[in-house]
Image (spheres, rainbow, N blue to C red):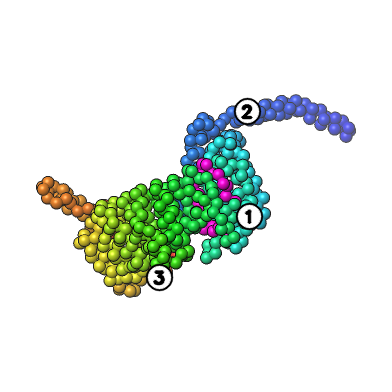
Amino acid sequence: MSIASLLREQIADIDSQLPALRQQLADLEARQAQFVAQLSEIKFPVLTLPHEVTLYIWSFVLEPWNPVYEYSEYVPAQPALVLASVCRVWRQLALSTTELWSTLIVSWPHTGPVYSILLASLFLKRSGSIRPLDVDFRFIGRPEHIQSIQVEEAFNTLKPVEGRLQRLRISYDGQGVDSAFLDPKILPDALPKLQVLDLGSFRLSDKTNNISTRSTPRLSYLRVESAQMARRLGLSPCNLVTLVLSCVEPVQTAEMLSAAPRLETLHLGKGRSEESVTGASRRRLGGDLCLVHLRELSCLHADWAELIDRLSLPRLESAILGYSLDTRAAAAFTLCIRCNPQPPLRELTIRGIAVGATWRAIVCLPPTVSELTLDALPWDFAHTAQFCQDVRTRLLLPGLKHLRVENWACNYEDPATVATVGLWVDTVASRWIDRTTAKSVNSASPESAPPPVRLKSFFLGLSNSDDSDWHIKELQVLDPLRKMKDEGLDVRVFIKNRFTCSLPI
């Protein structure tokens, strides 16, 4: 057989196989198309939900406006961008949901803010034309790096929506003595819907001495550096519910408080004093000032004493005394408490002050105080021992239910510091009534005295300078706490050193 004949046979053989292969290929393509069609018809369970249900679920991931006074420096992921990146269905739903885009958090670098402007424009476009806006501008860099043009560029993006601003906050991530400056002309003159204004540590530039006039009829939360700054900005305090001030200005603050009859929360910071409290300034403070609605007071600087001792707070429920306060400020707080015949004070926090410095205030605390927090107290063994003794015998704080001792320095090699831990443990033990005792007290005759208030929780935070914490864990002084915890007392003990934080019981 010739070569040509052999090739013809092979070609014929292939020709005979091709129809079957073509049919097999067609069948495979048909099955593939069928599977693709079936797959396209299948929806993941989350995509089968009605849009109303999906939006309700989304509402739980929307970051609420956080009315606290210290903020983290990082910028959280924005729900609108995250949800719009999941899939096509969610992207379409997210782009058409104005609520997702009504909270705007933008970081502004001091160079190249093009991306920030585009991001702000995107949110403002997608937020519709009616919904109120919450805006948080965070300027990157230390105060000396933040230029007025940078802040002005940020506020220029808000000009089309000034009438919709509901909450506005600006901040910078540099922590130091210096402050960034703000030109008051940048703020809009009319803010009809503004409820929250937080200007952080920004200060007004020295060249702006004129008093502005602004319309802020709904302003209820204000955080500014000083009362003088609020006055120069022309902000109305008549509807304020919360006021947070950084710098000490007793006279101007008193004037502002007299114009804020609805105030419920007042935080007086520990910033540098803007006024020298002289005899003349004391006379300018005037007489007593009654804040009938104030429920929460925080005072972190001793120079506020001239203001505090002139306040009458008939509804005060929570107070924080901290850091640079001295006996003079504590005495002022004592007068503030005594001026009310039946003070409803429930919570007290003493932070960074020796017990001796606040002793006059402590011994005057009303029996209504049920929560006491002692945080980062300096070493003061004598007054601490006296305090614990009076609490054990119920001469102090007869209504105490919750006690927190945080950041208590403890060196396991120092018998004195270990002994103070024992003082706290003994105090808790004396105020703890087990179920058997409580039952016997409750079964007494109706004419007998009411049972003493039972301690419900105790938190002890020990700061250990040593790298290892097992020594304190093994201290027998903590053994009674373990027993009380088994009996039902809510006990938490943390030992913190440079590397670890542990729970020994």
* Magenta region: 186-205
Choose the circle earlier in sequence order: 3 or 2.
2
Choose the circle earlier in sequence order: 3 or 1.
1
Q: Residues within 10 Å of mark 3 (few under 14, many from 20)?
A: some
Q: Which structural element holds mark 3?
A: loop
Q: Is residue 67 left or right of residue 417?
A: right
Q: Residue at x 53, y 31 (%)?
A: 51
Residue 202 in view, yes or no: yes
Q: Which residue is mark 3?
A: 466
Q: Give the percent coordinates (x, y) of residue 102.
A: 55, 41
Choose the circle earlier in sequence order: 1 or 2.
2
- SS majority, magenta: loop
The quadrant in which residue 496 appears is: bottom left
Q: Which residue is mark 2?
A: 37
Q: Give the percent coordinates (x, y) of residue 333.
A: 33, 60
Q: Which structural element holds mark 2?
A: helix
- Of residues 37 and 86, the one drawn nearer to the viewer in this rendering: 86
Discs 3, 1 touching: Cβ within 8 Å: no
Instruction: Indicate whether residue 450 is drawn in magenta.
Output: no
Residue 400 in view, yes or no: no
Q: Which residue is mark 1?
A: 150
Q: Is residue 138 left or right of residue 426?
A: right
Q: Quadrant of the C terminus?
A: bottom left
Q: Give the percent coordinates (x, y) of residue 424.
A: 28, 64
- The Cα–Cα distance between marks 1 and 2, rounded to whole angstroms, is 53 Å
Q: Quadrant of the N terminus?
A: top right
**Res 329 label:** none
- The Cα–Cα distance between marks 3 and 2, rounded to whole angstroms, is 67 Å
Q: Which structural element holds mark 1?
A: helix
Q: Amino acid at mark 1?
A: Gln
Q: Residue at x 61, y 59 (%)?
A: 146
